[in-house]
Image (tube, rainbow, N blue to C red):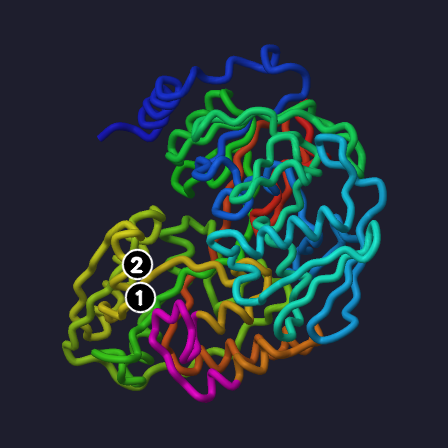
Amino acid sequence: MRSRRTLLVTALAAVCGLTAGCFTGAASQGPQRLRMALPFPPSQAMSPWGNDGIMLTKLGIAETLVGLDRSGRPEPLLAESWTRPSDTRWRFHLRTGVKFHDGTPLTAQAAADALNRAAHASPVPRAVKGLDLVASADGDLDLTVTTAKPDPILPQRLSSPNLVVLAPGAYTDKSANPRNTGTGPFVLQELKGDESAALGAFPGHWAGAPRLSGVDVRFIPDGQTRTAALRAGEVDVAASLPVSTAENLQRIEVPLPRVVALSLNTAKGVFADPALRAVARSAVDRNALASGVYESHADAARGLLGPATPWATAPAPQPAADRVATGEKVVLATISDRPELPEVASAVAEALRRKGFVVDQVVRQYNQLEADVLAGRFDAVILSRSYVQDSGDPAGYLDTDYTCTGTYNLTKLCSAEVDAAVAKAVAAQDTAAREQATLDAQAAVLATSAVVPLVHERTFIGHSAAVHEIDQDPYERRLVTRSTTRE
């Protein structure tokens, strides 16, 4: 068996061979240029309305009207303040003196046009889907946004990277081009397909000029190859490193609002029986998964909401099951896209066997598994799931995943008690009341034993000793900022 070091060296050679040469040092890149390796290549030329949107905020190219603080609460960004004149109408006041990279000023009309184009994009960004959102300018810096029905978390929704505001010249009938049209501290100057991107500093940023002169980005899907490039000094920052490769690297560990959970099919088969669901729940050793599979770089899950959500207190422990299984057969599925999940599934399968279940395992790539998972063709599924979706609000996750009408209800749970608790959380207007109602709804879901939270993941950002002020954003929307430096 080849050593880990050999594998990393081989991976580095691969990335040097497959791209247009590796980075060759700071001198050729200019002073204070940062070299980065990111995992997901752009698939839509960095259009804001699809999966590429998050790159625009992560790289400091474009900005949204509203940001999220560490608790998922809204904070000012391009909009300095907002009010709610009525249940279906919000009013946002924009910052003065903000300019786009092409020199044009940010106005309420430009922001309204950007939001309206996003609301009519195909597909519509998830954050505003079904809202019938309409934006209009009320003067130079005041913007009104209306929705068809009351929406207490509209400011959080407007923090979605899919809703960045670009200069008027960015838009055509069906597309948006972020090159030289953002408001962030860095200007997208060049995008070479799915291989690389070059960014320059924007000295006219409203909060002040960035400390870097630019950023050079390589898109390297393979985690071992990203790690190898960092170890060899070919990049200064490598994002989303696999746990198994991050040993002895200078790195940042950021708790994520994600839960790896065991979802049990409550509609048919073995786990239609609540008592057998409780047996499965009692079988799992979360601490062993966090310390073993994740090498203590994940947090054992006490609930669906984890340490990335500071206001989420741990729910009361569920009582242990008072029976064991008697040879009931279970088909347990997971995906191979996340390297830890097959190992998690093997550990959970063994724990279920010790409780008397007969377990078969299925492991596929997500795109090959999704249709069967959504159709409820397995008894149990282990997946990693973001619980803040696009808005930073966990109540929406509980609605889509655990209610009778939920569009991603892997457990097929349909409980009047759960639906009522989730509906209360979704409708709550006050922030504190909404958070408490969300915790109550989480408790209602856990009481059914339809889902067994396993671990809360962290992301690993490796960096050289010369790099400082990488953003530790739990929502992974920010990474390089105007404060980031490279010595």
- Of all residues, the one furthest to the front in this rendering is 173
Q: Are marks 2 and 1 in contact (CB under 8 Å)?
A: yes
Question: Residue placed at 71% from the left, 38% from the top?
Answer: 183
**Residue 186 seen in this snapshot:** yes
Image vertical order of residue 80 relative to residue 58, above or below: below
Residue highlighted by disc 1:
374
Tell me where residue 359 appears, x and y as whole percent: 18, 66
Question: Residue placed at 36% from the left, 52% from the top?
Answer: 293
Which quadrant would residue 193 be assigned to in this image? Answer: top left
Side (left or right) of 419 relative to 431? left
Image vertical order of residue 82 relative to residue 343, above or below: below
Tell me where residue 219 appears, x and y as whole percent: 45, 31
- Of all residues, the one furthest to the top in this rendering is 28
Question: Residue placed at 63% from the left, 54% from the top?
Answer: 116
222 or 424: nearer the viewer: 424
Q: Which range is magenta?
A: 401-420
Question: Which kind of residue does numbered mark 2 sit on?
Answer: Glu
Residue highlighted by disc 2:
370
Side (left or right) of 57 relative to 107? left
Tell me where residue 464 appears, x and y as whole percent: 57, 27
Question: Which kind of residue does numbered mark 1 sit on?
Answer: Leu
Which quadrant would residue 273 be assigned to in this image? Answer: bottom left
Count of numbered marks: 2
Element type where label 1 sits in the image? helix
